[in-house]
Image (spheres, rainbow, N blue to C red):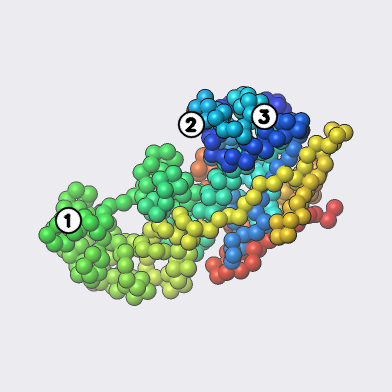
């Protein structure tokens, strides 16, 4: 593999097997390219930065997700004959643009926060250094990946913190489209979930998979006991039986009667968990099933998880679906992709920025770093300008290079995330809505 140390400037990223990602873009990126080619500035050096102006309302920190996927997408950003044929039929797209796209390979450099790291408003999460032509085409694909994966990872991280050690299972595939479901499983696992219900996530990423039965299985039999008997016969007594199809108490009694006191677990998918969980635990213990686990599901989020832990409810695991994979629980990460520097007539880089009301940006290439107190707790997110600026002592440099991400395992990102969250101040981990714990600030030097 070409590494960060051996890949020369101007050398294209090597491709990896996979479908073309070039059409995961907006048309205006191609028309901007065409105008720049004809104006003569398509090949000027530029710096683009991807960052969030703000966090979703009430969020105190975000989590960077999708970095390895984004780098993979850049490596596969090439135009196929079919794609070029379609563009050539468009009266707005000229042959000079088609010819440029025919030979397109990204030849710049990408720096970014490593996957699983936390971020805050104005943190320069990803930096792309390349010609305007090379960099502008990547806007949509980078934002689509990082915005979604970061949204899910941020939501999942809050849930893991709220669960306070209760294992969480990602079960949201049926609430998302098939591609998003896969990437949500990946993001949730990096954030600390222990398993997923989605088999493709197990195949693609090695995430542990889990699942036993739904209400339809129980309803397919003449009565609940017959259904439980069939499941135990097929899967063993360590299985988890869904006990709320007809009534939780009777379901528990039937489950223990069929599986015995060695029953692995019960799942409750309805009702008031504050009342039902203690009753279920008491009944299981009364029946002698003292080691049988209780698994909860149904519209669980960080707030219900926080209630569970605050009340010290005897929950052994929880399945989370809708609230971790959709906008209702994982609102957009609010990331944007903006030009912050371009090459001037003298060959020097010139900072550029927007002044648009509510959408202003800060010009200039930035180096981000983070400081901590003597106990290792984060105290500030800062940045300075210039590629080779010397950083203060005792700080964490946050931006690393693209090739680092490409071969990284999910467990590496998962461990990084756990370390990053452990170093946040307690105020950043509060579940109730509040302001971001930090905003990236220019250093005083």
The reply to whether the C-beta atoms of the residues labelled 2 and 1 are less than 8 Å apart is no
Front residue of 378/246: it is 246
Label 2 sits on a secondary structure element that is loop
Say whether residue 198 is left or right of residue 155. Answer: left
User: Residue 350, how many percent across, how many down?
Assistant: 82, 41
User: Residue 150, how many percent across, how many down?
Assistant: 55, 51
Most distant residue in the bottom direction: 275
Residue located 71% across and 31% down the image: 37
Q: How many discs mark residues in the rendered view?
A: 3
Residue at the spot of label 3: 107
**Label 3, label 2: how far apart the Cα atoms are:** 19 Å
**Label 2, label 1: how far apart the Cα atoms are:** 41 Å
Q: Earlier in the sequence, mark 3 or mark 2?
A: 2
Label 1 sits on a secondary structure element that is loop
Front residue of 269/348: it is 348
Residue at the spot of label 2: 19
Residue at the spot of label 1: 220
Q: Is residue 341 visible?
A: yes
Most distant residue in the right direction: 346
Most distant residue in the front direction: 91
Task: For label 3, count other residues whose C-alpha is less than 10 Å away and answer few (under 14), some (14-19) or many (20+).
Answer: many
Q: Which quadrant holds the N terminus?
A: top right
């Amino acid at each position: 593999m070409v590494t960060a140390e051996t890949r020369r400037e101007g050398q294209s990223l090597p491709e990896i097997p996979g479908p073309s990602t070039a059409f995961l873009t907006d048309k205006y990126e191609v028309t901007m390219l065409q105008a720049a080619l004809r104006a003569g500035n398509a090949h000027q050096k530029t710096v683009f930065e991807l960052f969030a102006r703000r966090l979703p309302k009430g969020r105190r920190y975000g989590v960077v997700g999708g970095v390895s996927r984004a780098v993979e997408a850049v490596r596969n950003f090439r135009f196929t004959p079919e794609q070029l044929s379609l563009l050539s039929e468009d009266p707005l797209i000229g042959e000079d643009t088609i010819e440029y796209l025919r030979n397109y390979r990204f030849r710049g450099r990408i720096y970014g926060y490593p996957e699983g790291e936390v971020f805050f408003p104005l943190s320069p999460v990803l930096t792309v250094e390349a010609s305007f032509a090379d960099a502008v085409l990547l806007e949509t694909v980078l934002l689509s990946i990082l915005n979604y994966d970061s949204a899910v990872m941020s939501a999942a991280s809050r849930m893991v913190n709220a669960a306070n050690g209760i294992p969480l299972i990602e079960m949201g595939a049926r609430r998302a489209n098939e591609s998003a479901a896969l990437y949500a499983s990946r993001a949730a696992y990096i954030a600390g979930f222990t398993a997923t219900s989605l088999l493709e996530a197990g195949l693609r990423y090695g995430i542990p998979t889990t699942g036993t039965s739904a209400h339809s299985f129980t309803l397919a039999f003449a009565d609940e006991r017959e259904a439980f008997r069939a499941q135990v016969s097929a899967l063993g007594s360590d299985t988890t039986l869904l006990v709320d199809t007809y009534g939780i108490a009777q379901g528990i009694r039937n489950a223990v009667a069929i599986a015995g006191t060695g029953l692995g677990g019960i799942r409750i998918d309805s009702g008031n968990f504050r009342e039902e969980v203690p009753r279920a635990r008491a009944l299981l213990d009364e029946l002698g099933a003292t080691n049988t686990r209780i698994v909860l599901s149904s519209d669980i989020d960080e707030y219900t998880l926080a209630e569970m832990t605050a009340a010290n409810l005897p929950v052994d695991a929880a399945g989370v679906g809708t609230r971790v994979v959709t906008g209702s629980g994982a609102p957009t990460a609010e990331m944007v992709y903006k030009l912050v520097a371009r090459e001037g007539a003298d060959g020097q880089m010139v900072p550029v920025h927007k002044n648009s009301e509510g959408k202003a940006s800060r010009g200039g290439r930035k180096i981000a770093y983070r400081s901590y107190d003597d106990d290792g707790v984060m105290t500030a997110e800062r940045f300075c300008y210039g590629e080779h600026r010397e950083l203060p002592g005792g700080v964490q440099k946050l931006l690393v290079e693209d090739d680092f991400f490409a071969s990284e395992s999910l467990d590496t990102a998962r461990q990084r995330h756990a370390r990053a969250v452990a170093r946040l101040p307690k105020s950043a981990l509060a579940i109730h809505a509040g302001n971001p714990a930090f905003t990236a600030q220019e250093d005083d030097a």
